[in-house]
Image (tube, grey):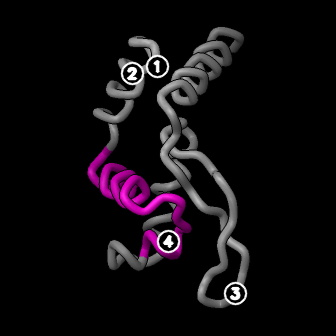
Amino acid sequence: MIANTSREVYIKLRSKLNRNQQIVYQAIKQNEPITNEKIADALGWVINKVTGRVNELVTIGMVEHQGYDLTRSKRRAKTWVIATPKHIQDRVADMVALDERN
């Protein structure tokens, strides 16, 4: 069972995403696990537009790396999934602790 505080943090973070972050978040949610290349294909975007948004979502703890898949050129690429609310709460707690130390 997920604590209410975890759910609240998750909802608060999700509401602060900008438009492109929300679009990428939804693409990941609907197709997880998914690579940056597949996100770009699904959205009709260039990959450079996707990778920045994915990195932002990873940094704030909304998305996490799960495994690997192959790209069209047969290179290994990370796959992304939506982070659990508990993971998000832990990430926020880590960021707060880091801020307090600095």
| Magenta-span inclusion, residue 86 | no
Q: How far apart are marks 4 and 1 (CA)?
A: 35 Å
SS class, disc 3: loop
Query: Mark 2 against mark 1, which lies toward the viewer?
Result: 1
Disc nearer the start of the sequence (3/1): 1
Question: What amino acid type is highlighted by mark number 3?
Answer: Lys
Residue located at (53% from left, 24% from top): 86
Is residue 72 shown left or right of residue 15?
Answer: right
Question: What amino acid type is highlighted by mark number 1?
Answer: Ile
SS class, disc 1: loop
Q: Are marks 2 and 1 in contact (CB under 8 Å)?
A: yes
Q: Main secondary structure of the magenta part?
A: helix
Q: Where is residue 57 in the image (x, y as percent from the top left)?
A: 49, 46
Magenta highlight range: 18-40
Where 96 sits versus 72, above or below? above
Residue 7 disc label? 2
Where 67 sits versus 76, above or below? above
